[in-house]
Image (cartoon, rainbow, N blue to C red):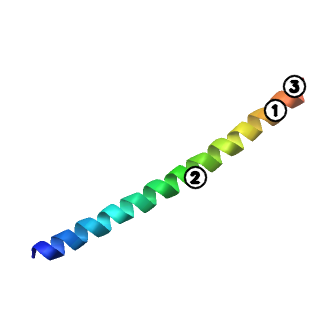
Amino acid sequence: MYLKTFIYCTLALCNCKIVTLYTLKLLRNGLGLRLIGIGMTSSEKS
C-alpha cells in the first residue's frame, strides 16, 4: 500500500515537473514573440 502511494506521488511530481517546464517554454516563446512584435510596431511608428 505504501509503495503504491510512493510510486503515485513520484509520478505526480514528474508530471508536475514536465508541465512546469513545458509551460515555462511556452511562456518564453510567447514573450519572445511579444517582444519581437513590440519591436516591429515601434520600428514601424518611427
Query: In the picture, residue 35 is in which quadrant?
Result: top right
Q: Earlier in the sequence, mark 2 or mark 1?
A: 2
In terms of secondary structure, where does tag 2 sit?
helix
Q: Which residue is mark 1?
A: 41
Q: Which residue is mark 2?
A: 26
Amino acid type at mark 2: Leu
Quarter where residue 32 is shown: top right
Q: Position of residue 37 (x, y in %)?
A: 76, 39
Element type at mark 3? helix
Identify the amino acid type marked 1: Thr
How many angstroms separate mark 3 from mark 1 (CA)?
6 Å
Q: Position of residue 24 (x, y in %)?
A: 52, 50
Cα separation between marks 2 and 1: 22 Å
Foreground label between 2 and 1: 2
Residue matched to label 3: 45
Asked whether, in this view, residue 31 is left or right of residue 16, the answer is: right
